[in-house]
């Protein structure tokens, strides 16, 4: 089943001094989803924001809030992320001791359930939870920071996941170093949700629409 192409700008690359305005601007510029990079300073070296900030930002856009939890214990705050307004919650397979239970809990609480794989992680761990998944996130950089270079080896992983899921209604999302120059190869490999931080927010608000168009059409 071919899924609709969606562009999900990552606010990690936005101007943090005015996040609400930035989300409203990227929404208006044509973003399909808003990618929220939650980092706990433990699972990844960086530390960003959590449910209170997300709750405050919820009123700035009606677009799909796509929470990427780069945290060591994702089960602890699931209720808070969903109450804050996250429409999708993606946990890292490397941090989910009981992934089947966590994905079921995300769905039971009313959000779309996603799992993310770091660049070194193979896809075998997905085999027995495919029926619990709405989204699979392939990290094309080592998580923690924006502005890194795309890891080309992940293209094979994307294609392998595409084959694994068959005609299931599961989005394949790619995150890290995605630009207008490589987005064509990423889509050709099988991805349909494209996260971009630097490539979406570069140049400031007057460039956002052109940036998103370049990613959508690349
Ligand atoms: C990295 C984050 C990515 C990152 C993307 O840990 O998960 O979403 O912000 O930023 P770019 O597109 O600049 O690599
Ligand atoms: Zn991310």
Image (spheres, grey):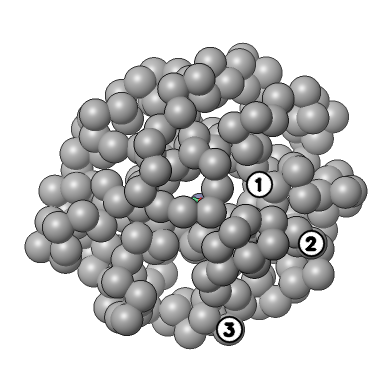
> 55 or 40, which is in the foreground?
40
> 118 or 127, which is in the foreground?
118
Q: Are marks 3 and 2 in contact (CB under 8 Å)?
A: no
Mark 2 vs mark 1: which is more N-terminal?
Answer: 2
Q: Residue furthest front?
A: 45
Query: Could you say where residue 2 lies in the image, as x and y percent from the top left?
Result: 48, 25
- Within 10 Å of disc 3 (Cα), the crowding (few <14, some 14-19, many 20+) is few
- Within 10 Å of disc 2 (Cα), the crowding (few <14, some 14-19, many 20+) is some
Element class at badge 2:
loop
Q: Label 1 to label 3, Cα distance in Å?
A: 21 Å
Residue behind mark 2: 73
Label 3 vs label 2, nearer the camera: 2
Mark 3 vs mark 2: which is more N-terminal?
Answer: 3
Q: Label 2 to label 1, Cα distance in Å?
A: 15 Å
Q: Label 3 to label 2, Cα distance in Å?
A: 18 Å
Residue behind mark 3: 52
Q: Are marks 2 and 1 in contact (CB under 8 Å)?
A: no
Mark 1 residue CB less than 8 A from any atom of ligand 2? no
Label 2 vs label 1, nearer the camera: 2
The quarter holding residue 208 reads bottom left
Task: Residue at 16%, 63% (x, y): give it.
Answer: 204
For residue 178, the mark is none
Element class at badge 1:
strand
Q: Quadrant of the N terminus?
A: top right
Vertical comparison of 113 with 162: above or below: below
Residue behind mark 1: 114
Task: Residue at 48%, 84% (x, y): give it.
Answer: 56
Element class at badge 3:
helix
The quarter holding residue 45 reads bottom right
Task: Residue at 47%, 77% (x, y): give it.
Answer: 58
């Amino acid at each position: 089943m071919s899924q609709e192409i969606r562009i999900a700008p990552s606010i990690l690359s936005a101007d943090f001094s005015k996040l609400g305005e930035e989300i409203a601007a990227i929404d208006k510029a044509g973003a399909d989803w808003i990618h929220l990079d939650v980092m706990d300073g433990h699972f990844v070296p960086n530390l960003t924001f959590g449910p209170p900030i997300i709750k405050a930002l919820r009123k700035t856009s009606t677009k799909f809030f796509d929470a990427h939890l780069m945290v060591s214990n994702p089960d602890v705050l699931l209720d808070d992320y969903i109450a804050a307004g996250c429409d999708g919650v993606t946990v890292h397979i490397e941090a989910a001791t009981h992934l089947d239970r966590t994905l079921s809990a995300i769905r039971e609480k009313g959000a779309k359930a996603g799992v993310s794989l770091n660049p070194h992680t193979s896809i075998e761990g997905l085999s027995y939870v495919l029926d619990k998944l709405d989204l699979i996130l392939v990290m094309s950089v080592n998580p923690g920071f924006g502005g890194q270079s795309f890891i080309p080896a992940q293209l094979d992983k994307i294609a392998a996941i595409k084959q694994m899921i068959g005609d299931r209604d599961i989005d394949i999302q790619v995150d890290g170093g995605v630009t207008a120059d490589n987005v064509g190869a990423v889509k050709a490999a099988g991805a349909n949700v494209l996260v971009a931080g630097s490539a979406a927010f570069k140049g400031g608000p007057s460039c956002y629409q052109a940036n998103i168009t370049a990613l959508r059409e690349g």
